[in-house]
Image: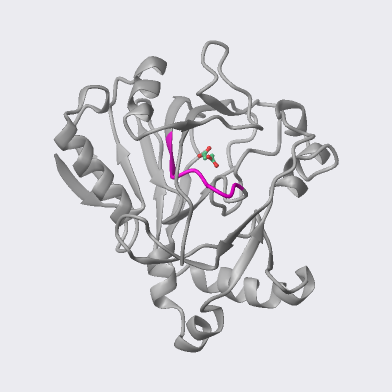
Amino acid sequence: MQTTPMAPECGVEISGVALASCSDAEMQDIKNAIYEHGVAVFRDQEFSKEDHITFGKRWGGIDVNNYFPLTEDYAEIAVVKKDPDQTVNIGGDWHTDHSYDQIPAMGSVLVARELPPQGGDTMWAHMGAAYDALPQDLKDEIEGLEAFHTADHIYKADGLYAQTDMGRSLRGHDLKTGAVHPVVIRHPHTGRKLLYVNRAFTINIVGRTREESLPLLQRLYDAALTGDNECRLQWKPGTVAIWDNRTTWHNAMNDYQGHYREMHRITLSGEALAA
Ligand code: SIN
């Protein structure tokens, strides 16, 4: 396997491995690379829906997404799609998948199934590098804090998506979510400190109102994107990306209006997070 960095502090492209048939040793190397770099990209993969599920299960469990449409044949695979006439996409702002769960998904395996002629890239940002780059006074200010996360304002019947043309594609309008996590977590495998708030799902610092929390959250969101800790993937047929949700934020570009884009996502089960 060969690895090529995608950016100074985020992402790695891995070549010389077939995900559908990789050995246990290769799998361990892939996992370690993702824990460290946040996201790994694999090109020219032959990766059927069955391969996708089998590969996902090699990480442990699969968290079935409660909101996205699922493939007709497999509930484990969520369909992240946008029709040519839809203007709003899924995941079109910086976020961390499933941070609204008390045991959030460890990561995601995203497979390109149908791509627009151009555009539709995905970006990631490394939250370990983001934490490291914070000024010391800000690190001191967030030490020991916890934050509340939910998805209700986004997916419920009168939530953000329901007010757009993406609303018709989503499910789970009646679900109630809510979780509390440390603002700075330690990666369960590497022990690295990671900034764990995101502007899609983090509502408030525990013990403060939303209004009281916003100035601090906004300072963290502004500081979290440094340029060097961001990478961008231009998808091609056969591309698979696997990322660690604890280590990264991601953001799906919505710049292919009038074209269809379909991705298949498996969300990998995670573990409780600790400071
Ligand atoms: C997501 O998982 O948030 C969507 C990513 C993408 O469609 O590129």
- 45 vs 139, left or right, is left
Residue 242 in sight: yes
- Position of residue 192 measured from the top left corner of the image (x, y, whole percent): 34, 65
According to the image, what is the colour scheme of the structure? one colour
Magenta region: 101-109
User: At 46% from the left edge and 62% from the top edge, which residue is drawn?
Assistant: 274
User: At 33% from the left edge and 26% from the top edge, which residue is drawn?
Assistant: 55
Q: Nearer the viewer, residue 216 or 2?
A: 216
Q: Nearer the viewer, residue 80 or 195?
A: 195
Q: Quadrant of the N terminus?
A: top left
**Above or below 72: residue 142:** below
Q: Main secondary structure of the magenta part?
A: loop
**Above or below 269: residue 248:** below
- 117 vs 242, left or right, is right
User: At 25% from the left edge and 49% from the top edge, which residue is drawn?
Assistant: 33
- 164 vs 104, left or right, is right
Q: Residue furthest right?
A: 158
**Above or below 209: residue 67:** above
Label count reads 0
User: At 54% from the left edge and 68% from the top edge, which residue is drawn?
Assistant: 183
- 30 vs 49, left or right, is left
- Position of residue 117 measured from the top left corner of the image (x, y, whole percent): 49, 29
Q: Nearer the viewer, residue 143 or 260?
A: 143
- Position of residue 46 measured from the top left corner of the image (x, y, whole percent): 30, 20
Name the image quarter holding residue 235.
top left
Q: Is residue 104 magenta?
A: yes
- Position of residue 227 measured from the top left corner of the image (x, y, whole percent): 42, 66
